[in-house]
Every structure is written in C-alpha cells, then in structure tokens.
Amino acid sequence: MRQVLNVKLAQQLSLTPQLQQSIRLLQLSTLELNQELESLMTENPLLEREDPDLETLPVALNGATHDEPAATGAEAPPAESSDGNETDFDWFVDDAPAGARYDDGDESEYPQQAAENCSLYEHLMEQLGMTRLPERDKNVVHTLIAALDENGYLSQSLEEIADMLPAELEIELEELQIGLRHLQNFDPVGVGARNLAECLALQLSALPAATPLRALAIDIVQDHLDTLAARDFVRLKRQLRCDDESLRRAQQLIKSLNPHPGSAYGASDTRYIVPDIIVSKSKDSWIATLNPDAMPRLRINHMYAQILQSKVHPPCAQMSVQLQEARWLIKSVQQRFETILRVAQAIVERQRHFFDHGDVAMRPLVLREIAQTLDLHESTVSRVTTQKFMTTPRGILELKYFFGSHVSTEAGGACSATAIRALMKQLVSAENCKKPLSDAKISKILGEQGIVVARRTIAKYRESLNLPPMSMRRAL
C-alpha cells in the first residue's frame, strides 16, 4: 500500500472561549445571568459588583479610574436612548473611599427571613396534638395522616392500610374507620376524603344547615357528579325533580368548594420574573428602554488593579489572566443588554398596533424579519427573545410572545395566530351559554370576516386557550 502526502487548504469556523461565553450570557435569563455572575465572581477576585447604595461615587470612563487600568482596549461608545439623547449606563464606577461604611442600624445585621410555609402534614399533626384522643387512637390518626397525598386525599383504601400495618399492633379495620372520621373533622375541611365526591360532600356538610339548597348540592355530589360534569342538565332535572333556578344555585354552591383542600399547604414553586425592557409611550410612539434594576453593575476590583499597576511588585501571571477575563466579561454583559435593547425596539416598532389596541391587532412576525432588519443571525434573535421579558401597559410579556404562526386571509394578507385566538376569546365570551358556539361555527364566523381558518385549527387554538369544548361550555 503506497502512502501519499497531500496538502489541503480549508476554512473552519472555531469559537473562541470568549465568544462561547458571550453566546452563553446572551441566552441566559436575567435571574440565571445573576447566578452565573455570582459564580464567576467567586472564581475571579478581580471582578466584583458595584455597591448599589454608593450613589455618590464618580463614574469612571470605560471602567478605568485615574489609578486603575482600563477594562477594555478602546473606549466604549455611549449608548443612545430611543429619543436620540445619549445616556450613560454607568456600567463601571470607582470603589468606595477607604474605610467608608454605611450602617443601616441593627436590621442590617439581622436580615428578615421569609416565613417557611407549613406543610399539610405539619398542619394536621399540630391539630392532632391538641386533641384529647387516647394515645392509641392518636397513633391510628397519625398513620392516616402519613398516607395522605399532597391534595389531602387518602388514595389508599383502609383495607390496604390495615394490611400494611404490623400484625403485632392488632389494629382492626373498625379502628381505622373511626380514626378517619376524626381526621375528616380536621382543618382544612375535606381532608381525608377518598374521592372527589366525598371531599365535596364533607365541605357541604360542614356548612350551616340553613344554607340554601345545601341538601340538593349534597345529593348531586354524592350520586350525580358524573352527570353534572357532563352538563346533562335535562337528565339532572328529571332525576332530582328540580327546576332550572334550583339546579343553577346548587351548581354555583358546588363550584364554590375546594376540590384540593391540601394544595394550600407546603412549599410553593414561585417563579420570579425580572423584566429586561420597559415599554412606554412617548407622544405618538412606543419606546423600549432597559430596566436599570435588571442590569448588573460590575467593576474591576480597585485594590488588585493597583497591585497589577504597581512597579514595586512584579505582576502575577495568574492575576493578569483574571484581569483580562474580567474585562471581557464586563464587555460581554454590556453587549448582551445592548443587543436585547436593539431587538426589543425593533419588535415594539413592528407591533405598535398591539400596544394601542391589544391582541386583536397583533401582526404576523418571524425571527427572520428582525434578524434581517438588525443584521443579526436568526439564532441570535432566538436567544435574545427566549426568557427575556418586557413590562408593558398590557402586562409583562416574553419577547417570544410577539412571534408566531399566521394564516392567510381572503384579501391575500396574513393574520397572526395571536389575533385569531383573541377573536376566538371574544366570540366565546359573548356567546349564548345555552347554545355555545361549536368549532365549526367559529370557523364559519371568522371566514365571514375574511380569515380562513380550518375547524381543526380552531380546535387547536381553543385548547391552547384552555377553553372547554362546546358541550362543556353549555349552562342552564
């Protein structure tokens, strides 16, 4: 076999670590960005946050003070606000004077802690401890409490629980039944139920006896809950021998109950949103500006910068590398917010009718249109609009909200899916509850307005809006 040596010239795209970091910072949400910065500041002592309480410190040009090396090689141009005036984002500030301290009193030393949510188990055990039941009965109730799910239901049967208990305890099924009755008297009302019908019946039974139509509501949840769920009101009236008004009021009473009594307890999965952009109206135009509370204020550590600049001590190679990394990170964060602002302003200009009139005026928009306008790659626009939010007079919205599919109109134009969903909500909210609109009827009404939408598309949009089908929207 003959060996041959060939020379080949080819181009290959290689992402530098700095570019990879810029791309990563761009796709992070504001909360994720702050977590990432905290991690980087832990690893790099030359990078630190500016103290937001120090408002009187002089602004440094391009991250450098009179005795600190510049963070970048060239002066960063001042950002321009949407009204044409130059605005200084104040990304870099000098350090506080030596020995400066700001004492806010004792409260700063002992920050307030958020109260921990009480779990359903703890709430019930606290009530059990205050009862005067014998110790054996308390142990039985404790066993039942431990078997409850997060909604407060007893998903296992009493027979299954009895089989799981050690034989030497000699706990009979009758004791478990008595313990369950004790448990079902605890707060929240409805806890310890074995199914939805029992849960609702327990809550109705706890109401005052003089509550109007309580007996009829109990009869419905115990024996006719499936018929009520199917909204077969004709059959219900025939079985219960009641009129429309009585059935309507009993239904309203049932709807006021809580089908998940235990859901109010335990840790809640709260997700906080920090808007990156603030949209406001100036005269006849809508303007996007950066949210100052969302922008992290970073700087180079003053003390370490002086050490690197000092001629007495030779510079440390590791600190020099960290200084370059800190400078690049500060520049990347600044570029991140500048890119978000450019994309947000382009979106606002194209969706100005939405801000004036709401969802029905949303125009079709794709990522490619914004990318071509701003001379950016489509993937960059995708990263910018993901998990980035703007606060507007119409609520806090993700930038992705302004993009979506569209359908054709008879006039040859296009209508956005958001506008179609808004029209559907208007039609459903104004429909006759006794004769709700079917998907085919909604499709026909939109067709009469020049918007051609298939029935299956209407069904898909209806499900995305969490609107029940026609049969489930029917009322008395």
Image (cartoon, grey):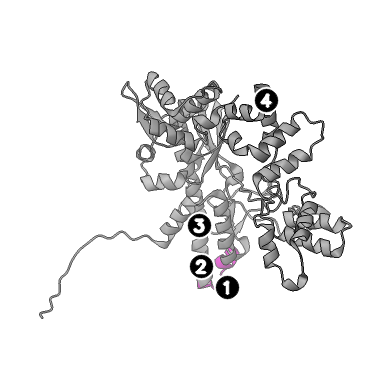
| Camera-nearest residue between 448 and 227 | 227
Query: Residue at image x 53%, y 51%?
Result: 62
Residue occupied by mark 1: 313
Q: Name the spot of residue 51 as percent of width and height, x first.
A: 66, 53
Residue 329 - label? 3
Q: CB under 8 Å between callouts 3 and 2?
A: no
* Secondary element type, mark 1: loop
| Camera-nearest residue between 284 and 53 | 284
Q: Is residue 148 above or below residue 408?
A: below
Q: Is residue 98 above or below residue 433?
A: below
User: Which label lies toward us, 1 or 4?
Assistant: 4
Identity of the amino acid at label 2?
Ser
Q: CA distance from mark 1 to mark 4?
A: 95 Å
- Who comes first in sequence, dot 2 or dot 1? 1
- Who comes first in sequence, dot 1 or dot 4? 4
Q: CA distance from mark 2 to mark 1?
A: 13 Å
Q: CB under 8 Å between callouts 1 and 4?
A: no
Residue occupied by mark 2: 320
The answer to whether residue 24 is seen in the rendering is yes
* Secondary element type, mark 3: helix
Query: Looking at this rendering, what residue extends furthest in the top direction?
Result: 448
Q: CA distance from mark 3 to mark 2?
A: 14 Å
Span colored in magenta: 305-317
User: Which label lies toward us, 3 or 2?
Assistant: 3
Q: CB under 8 Å between callouts 1 and 3?
A: no
User: Which label lies toward us, 1 or 3?
Assistant: 3
Q: Is residue 317 above or below residue 281?
A: below
Q: CB under 8 Å between callouts 3 and 4?
A: no
